[in-house]
């Protein structure tokens, strides 16, 4: 088992991960979703997300489970090499996806700001502070555990007006996906954030993680959770509205 006192440096994995996600995106854009014509970039982004979300959950879980710490709440412990690798893996994904939004969807300010803020948190933890990855990986797991379901739901939504199967998948997947997302982002997420805030607010990270760092992390993460909750609430409202509308026409 790797200990929390292990060096936080890792091989130059960030360039390799950048190349990996760029390759996945290009394969999706030019091969898999080529028939989507003007929407091929949307499919390519989802494909890349599929290759990030679940693997990130597995990698982060492995990093947390194989690292020995003095306390399970040691949110200020030094980043281990494996934790740093997970951070770089996610940084690479968000960098390539940010480029995707800047090129194809420059007016989607919410996603652009989300990606920039996420990169800020991971980059400062990885390169500037060198501590705190334990807390961020816990939140990364919660953020990405719904990724596979969300990407299938999103892809089906892109094609629901053209493909009958896609429409059916979207309709069947929406309620369980919304419920899963609500529990993770609306319940587990705030609890994890509170645990993190209580730890840092107690002064337990004093002299290890600068106040500006953990305060900015809490603001970014809290804002992301709030936006996620508002997003899923809007989808619940739309779903109930569609259900009520369909009943009226029966």
Image (cartoon, rainbow, N blue to C red):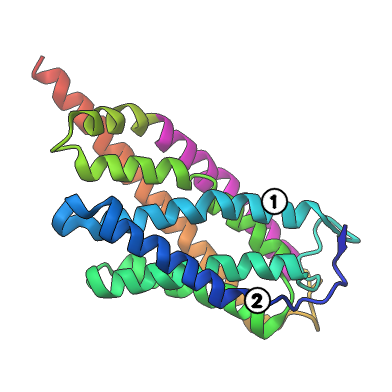
Please report the residue visible at 63 percent of the width from the left and 83 percent of the height from the top: 212
Of the two numbered discs 1 and 2 on the same chain, state the one appearing first in sequence: 1
Please report the residue visible at 47 percent of the width from the left and 41 percent of the height from the top: 182
Answer yes or no: do the residues labelled 1 and 2 have beta carbons within 8 Å?
no
Using the image as rendered, state which of residue 159 and residue 131 is in the foreground: 159
Q: Nearer the viewer, mark 1 or mark 2?
A: 1
Q: Quadrant of the N terminus?
A: bottom right
Left or right: where 202 falls relative to 69:
left
Residue 160, quarter of picture: top left
Residue 159, quarter of picture: top left
Could you tell me residue 235's position as x and y percent?
31, 42
Please report the residue visible at 35 percent of the width from the left and 59 percent of the height from the top: 27
Please report the residue visible at 46 percent of the width from the left and 44 percent of the height from the top: 148
Could you tell me residue 125's position as x and y percent?
65, 76
Helix, strand or loop at mark 1:
helix
Name the residue beneath numbered marker 1: 61
Magenta-colored stretch includes residue 24: no
Label 2 Cα neighbours within 10 Å, binned few <14 / some 14-19 / many ≥20: many
Using the image as rendered, state which of residue 30 and residue 193 is in the foreground: 30
Question: Which label number is shown at residue 193?
Answer: none
Between the residue at mark 1 and the residue at mark 2, the CA separation in whole angstroms equals: 18 Å
Magenta-colored stretch includes residue 181: yes
Q: Residue furthest front?
A: 31
Could you tell me residue 174's position as x and y percent?
34, 33
Task: Find the magenta span and give its range.
Answer: 176-200
Left or right: where 11 falls relative to 88:
right
Q: Residue furthest right?
A: 70
Q: Quadrant of the C terminus?
A: top left
Name the residue beneath numbered marker 2: 125
Using the image as rendered, state which of residue 63 and residue 118 is in the foreground: 63
Label 1 Cα neighbours within 10 Å, binned few <14 / some 14-19 / many ≥20: some
């Amino acid at each position: 088992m790797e200990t929390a006192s292990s060096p936080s440096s890792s091989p130059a994995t960030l360039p390799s991960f950048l190349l990996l996600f760029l390759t996945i995106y290009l394969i999706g854009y030019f091969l898999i979703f080529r028939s989507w014509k003007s929407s091929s970039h949307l499919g390519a982004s989802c494909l890349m997300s599929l290759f990030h979300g679940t693997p990130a959950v597995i990698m982060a879980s492995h990093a947390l489970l194989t690292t020995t710490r003095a306390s399970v709440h040691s949110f200020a412990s030094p980043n281990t090499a494996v934790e740093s690798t997970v951070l770089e893996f996610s940084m690479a994904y968000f960098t390539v996806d940010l480029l995707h939004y800047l090129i194809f969807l420059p007016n989607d300010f919410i996603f652009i700001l989300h990606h920039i803020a996420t990169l800020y948190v991971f980059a400062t933890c990885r390169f500037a502070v060198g501590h705190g990855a334990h807390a961020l990986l816990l939140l990364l797991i919660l953020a990405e555990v719904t990724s596979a379901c969300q990407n299938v739901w999103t892809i089906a939504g892109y094609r629901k007006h053209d493909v009958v199967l896609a429409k059916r998948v979207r309709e069947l997947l929406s309620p369980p996906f919304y419920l899963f997302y609500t529990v993770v982002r609306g319940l587990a997420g705030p609890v994890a954030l509170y645990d993190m805030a209580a730890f840092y607010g107690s002064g337990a990270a004093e002299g290890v993680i600068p106040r500006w760092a953990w305060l900015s992390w809490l603001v970014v993460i809290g804002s992301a959770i709030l936006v996620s909750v508002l997003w899923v609430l809007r989808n619940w409202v739309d779903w109930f509205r569609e259900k009520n509308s369909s009943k009226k026409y029966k």
